[in-house]
Image: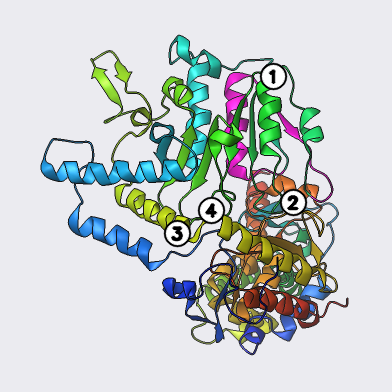
Amino acid sequence: MTLDRTTTVDGLLPSGLRRDFPYLDQELNGHPLAYLDSGATAQRPLAVLDAERAYLEHSNAAVHRGASTLVGTSTTAFEDARETVARFVGAGSREIVWASNATDAINMVALGMADASAGLGGPEAEIFRLGPGDEIVVTEAEHHADLIPWQRLAAKTGATLRWIAVNDDGTWTIDDAASVIGPRTRLVAFGHVSNVTGFLAPAAEVVELAHRHGALVMLDACQSVPHRPTDFAELGVDFAAFSAHKMLGPTGIGVLYGREHLLDALPPARTGGSTITTVTMESAAFLPAPQRFEAGTQPVSQAVALAEAVRYLDALGMHNVHAHETALAELLVEETSRVTGVRLVGPPPGNPRAALASVDVPGVHAHDVGQFLDSQGIAVRVGHHCAQPLHRRLGLRATTRASAYVYTTADEVRRFAAALAEVRGFFGVDA
Amino acid sequence: MSDLSGLYQELILDHSRRRLGDGELAEPHATHHELNPTCGDEITMGIRLDASGTVLEAIGWTGDGCSISMASASALTELAAGADLDRVRELIDGFRSMMRSQGAGEADEELLGDAIAFHGVSKYVMRVKCAMLAWVALEACIAAASTDAARS
């Protein structure tokens, strides 16, 4: 695969795509903005902004409440959005639950399992009950959002939290996983693509291994669904979470995927209006999924906007998006590896990685690196990227991360590397 | 890059390399650990007071962080070590006011001396915490030492 190094858009995606993103057409500190922070949050195309506004202008009404014509219109828009998102990830629409964000989606599972372990949910929730002797397995590379909920679940139930150790470059193999996952394992939770290293986990193999031991699998798909074709049914995962704002959609909404029979059995951690069948003064019976989890007013216009983001990505073609980002990833690795005195964390050159690069500049703190890039119009993320244990394992406290998306150009990647090459000089650190 | 030199003044870069006060203090009267959870920058500061309990006799700190946070700890040490506590409290208040100014007005050079180099940092809202880290730690140390003195 070759990347046209001279044009602003590389030919794998439609030229003119950047015109759909007004945000990108601005200056930062006197330079054309190079937005390389899509791993944190992506910018939204006009179509997504317009879809949300159009819904609010013409179709907004209380969803699933009452029986008016207007409610029919809004409820149809809301449920159509679910159908669109479901198709995008190889799911049925009953397998898609709206959450307030991906973190919330992971917590829904962890809190539901805690409720089940406390005896709620009846006999069908048996599969979620944990206790002493049971093990929850995560990896050392997890985002805090896919670590802390499981720490809490272990603390509440007496189960043991174990983790797959990562190698010096932050990656891990199915053999590493096999040394931790065993007959005591009840749940395995891991990131599909690391938000720090860009490492792609061997998801299907882990699912096969976990299921062989009767364990459930939860996939943190925040960094995969926006960037590569992802089919949860094909992967075989039991649960998955991803967020809208990293895939050209709005903030305030995330998605929990769960296999239908599991969602129907998982106790809802948050209860209230819209989740029930019959309520008496003593108790309540819950609807099947997804409604049993969607307590209170839902992020309706956000769901509509997310569906539009999905249509935008579908129109580009996720295979094309992935090809574009694979080319950018190769360029990122090639360009940053060439900069003297910079350590690129993650899979070594020649190995697959997502289009993101976290670097350490020895002698210069990531905050200072980021500030220097910022002064050059280059927007990156600095810090531990919500993965302190991984940074500690890599012997680092913080890194500087450039992350790309559909609108990222080869020129922006080269500007990142060129500015990076000036950092040590500016701060008076000799190479 | 010209606007960056307002943030990273030569004096700040000098201090980030000199790191005055860097090192654990023996037999401190109070210590305090301060962490900036957004970036992981941290400092552990120890102070020793004189026999009368009114003079900040010595400061020692260990830390890991960006050039702004480390330079600020160094500048603080230069200003506050050996000063009486009333003066130190005045310095902390003065430094905090300067960091809240968002770059407006004139910094109080008479009070803060070289530390007015950090005035430029106050324009960068995301970096103010970096500059304040050591000062917040010192404030906590003094409060702890004063409480101990009141108890004894």
Q: Amino acid at mark 4?
A: Pro
Q: Position of residue A154 (x, y in %)?
A: 62, 25
Kindly report which numbered mark, 3 or 1, lies closer to the viewer in this rendering: 3
Q: Which mark is residue A391?
A: 2
Residue annotated with mark 1: A213
Residue A297, horizontal then vertical, whole percent: 28, 41
Whether residue A266 appears in this view of the structure is no
Q: Residue at x 82, y 73 (%)?
A: A338
Query: Is residue A125 in view from this perspective?
Result: yes
**Host chain of mark 1:** A
Q: Disc 3 is attached to a residue of which chain?
A: A
Amino acid at pointer 1: His
* Residue B97 falls within the magenta-colored stretch: no
Q: Quadrant of the N terminus of chain B?
A: bottom right
Q: Earlier in the sequence, mark 4 or mark 1?
A: 1
Q: Chain of mark 4?
A: A
User: Could you classify mark 3 by the number of other residues whose Cα lies within 10 Å: few (under 14), some (14-19), or many (20 or more)?
Assistant: few
Q: CA distance from mark 3 to mark 1?
A: 40 Å
Q: Amino acid at mark 3?
A: Ala
Same subunit, tags 3 and 2: yes
User: Which residue, given by chain and number where applicable, does mark 4 sit on?
Assistant: A226
Looking at the image, which residue is at 88% across and 76% down?
A431
What's drawn in magenta, residue-wise? A141-169
Between disc 4 and disc 2, the foreground one is 4
A149 inside magenta stretch? yes
Give how far across and how far down residue A295 sits, in percent: 33, 33
2 or 1: tag closer to the N-terminus = 1
In the picture of the structure, the residue carrying the numbered disc 3 is A315
